[in-house]
Image (cartoon, rainbow, N blue to C red):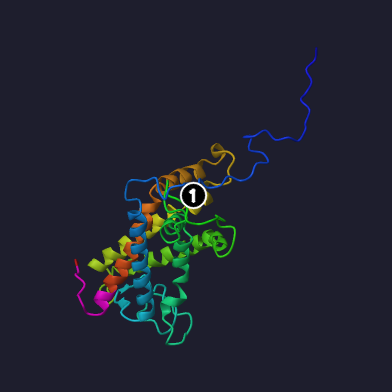
Amino acid sequence: MTATAPRRTGAVTPGSGFGMPAPRRAEIGARTLRTDRWWLQPLLTVLALVLFIAYSTFRAFQNAYYFAEPYISPFYSPCLTTGCQGDTFPKLFTGPSWISPAIYILVFPLGFRLTCYYYRKAYYRSFWLAPPACAVAEPHRRYTGEARLPLLGQNLHRYFFYAGLLFNLILTYDAVLAFRDPHGAWGHMGLGTLVLLGNAALLWLYSLSCHSCRHIVGGRLNSFSRHPLRYRFWTVVSRLNANHMKFAWASLFSVAFADFYVFLVASGTMSDPRFF
């Protein structure tokens, strides 16, 4: 007796995953099943991001105290207009005096962070409560993801990543220039030099640990054994990626601190200690 193949009827077996509706978020009848202070982390995230946004907005529009030879604030670098203070970057055009030079460039580093995979999780949960936390009731009636405007713009992250690498190179160049004294002589180092160096290093760690960087280095490969060099790079980036959240916050604070330090020196509030 020969076995015959089962007849295809077009029916879908429940649980097979084919032809079934897309899974929805788990519905929780109670407001929360958590007994801990689950709201503390989203609250701290909101406070930290709001403080950074407020400070960076104020400094960007202040248009003053961003250069103290040989230091320039990362909020204003590269300074592209002829009205910029200092000579850390070639002046490319003459802009209106009432427009701060920071406005021309901040869209790129801020766009990189705004579309960052980690920061999406951070502000989705903290600002929009989508979702607030695990085992906490979803306050929104439906979830559309990032397939509609304005969240469709999150797909620009990979392009902001390329711009972020360019800015990292420029800020590293600024850190090298910081090995001069206020008169332009090389071979000197002050506290500001260490501040700019630390900021540049953290920005590189944040960028290289990015999910997009990991995909660019090792993505779309069917066999790692055929690409040993890319596999090594992918392994290193994967290790960095495990600490992406830490680098994201550390670099956020380092950028603000570097700007604040330059502000203190440029405004005459403090003098820059010179080591040699």
Q: Name the residue at 66% across, 39% down.
A: 18
> Which residue lies under the disc numbered 1?
214
Q: What x and y, as percent, mark residue 215?
A: 52, 49
Q: Is residue 22 magenta?
A: no
Q: Which of the 4 image quarters holds residue 21?
A: top right
Does the image show residue 182?
Answer: no
Does the image show residue 43?
Answer: yes
User: Which one is nearer the viewer's eye here, 252 or 25?
Assistant: 25
Q: Residue furthest top?
A: 1
Q: What x and y, as percent, mark residue 193?
A: 27, 66
108 horizontally vs 41: left or right? right
Q: What x and y, as percent, mark residue 108?
A: 47, 68
Q: Which of the 4 image quarters holds residue 221?
A: top right
The amino acid type, in three-letter code, at marker 1 is Arg
Q: Name the residue at 38% across, 74% down.
A: 57
Q: Mostly what secondary structure, the magenta segment?
A: loop
Asked which secondary structure carries label 1, the reply is: helix
User: Which one is nearer the viewer's eye here, 144 or 32?
Assistant: 32
Q: Which of the 4 image quarters holds residue 79?
A: bottom left
User: Where does the magenta region start and end?
Assistant: 263-274
Does residue 39 lie above or below 171 as drawn?
above
Q: Which quadrant does the C terminus fall into?
A: bottom left
Q: Which quadrant does the N terminus fall into?
A: top right
Q: Residue furthest front?
A: 29
229 horizontally vs 266: left or right? right
